[in-house]
Image: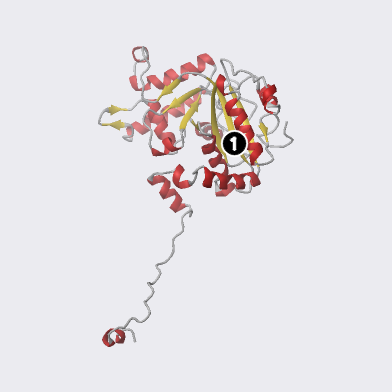
Amino acid sequence: MMQRSGPWSGYWALEPADVFELWNLIGQIGFRPGYIGKVLWRGLPSDSFEVKSSIIRQLESEQIVVSEDEVAHRERQYLENARRWGIGITEYGRVPDLHLLSMLQHHGVPTRLIDVSYNPMTALWFACSDPRYLDEPGVLVSMTVSDSKIFWTTDLPHGQASSIGIVEQAQLRAALQYSEDHKQAVLVEPRVRDARMTVQEGLFLTSSVPSAPSDGPVQGFPAGPDMPVYVDALKLDPQDVDYPNTGPTGVQVMGIVLTPEVKSQMSLYLSRNFNRSTRTMYPDMSGYAAAVQSGQLTFGPAEPEPIPEGTCFPAQWLANFS
């Protein structure tokens, strides 16, 4: 158990001494308990950050008590205003709410969706690369979830439309109803992926907001019941580990705290050996524009072309510059 302050302390996190211990932890989390569910990853550039959706952060900033009713109300306002704005309307009709939510999340509108990746290298890059937090510890967050149904953003659940009435709301309501009934977070996969989602191997984790808040650094999700057992298991020799099953409910969360030194070392490995950079993680126009605006790309004045030695100029041409 870590003797440190902040949200990632106690049995919520482990702190590897170097990149080799980090690699060992990633392997244990990914391979040993992975057969009982899915392991998802998220990178936090600062250990002062928690895992919570942007819509929950917004409600908290407005001093509104977070509940499923409040989240759903704010979410509905965003969706209805987006449709009035003309967003989510194509030549084939109106996209479902769940797909529209993923679009809004992609462009920075607060939603209940949490961006996660199947690939720990992608999450590590997000934890290590933000220039504003290079001198602070970061966190590689692993979330092991039960092997539950994946909700695709553009699918219509069978038997739902007639009971719900509004077809475009059916998939979102079905996902949240499943989450509430099973006390379980659900996975949301975009049916249509752009270049950014593809290279980041991204998807979303979301949930109906539990009635009781979590006491840890992950908010808005049902927590798994065996966190102390899960973390203690990671400290043992892999051959001696009996990992707790996530069971039918909950999310098993582990934060791997990355010191500034480990972040610096890992950044080099990620760039040189795993092809992780701003260009590869944001291979689109908005990614390029953000890199230009943030000063990540350098530009300078035009350099005069050198005049080859021995070049002769007409006297009249030289007189113009005398």
Q: Is residue 143 left or right of residue 77?
A: right
User: With respect to residue 39, does 124 lie above or below?
Assistant: below
Measured as percent of width and height from the top left, residue 230 is found at 66, 23
Q: Determine the residue positioned at 54% across, 17% down.
A: 183
Q: Amino acid at mark 1?
A: Leu
Q: Is residue 261 in view from this perspective?
A: yes
Measured as percent of width and height from the top left, residue 55 is found at 50, 32
Badge count: 1
Instruction: Examine the image and state in which quarter residue 213 appears.
Output: top right
**Circle 1 residue:** 140
Q: Is residue 111 in view from this perspective?
A: no
Measured as percent of width and height from the top left, residue 228 is found at 69, 24
Closer to the camera in the image, 121 or 258: 121
What scheme was used to colour the molecule? secondary structure
Measured as percent of width and height from the top left, residue 40 is found at 53, 29
Instruction: Examine the image and state in which quarter residue 305 appears.
Output: bottom left
Instruction: Examine the image and state in which quarter residue 5 appears.
Output: top right
User: With respect to residue 43, does 157 lie above or below?
Assistant: above
Closer to the camera in the image, 52 or 157: 157
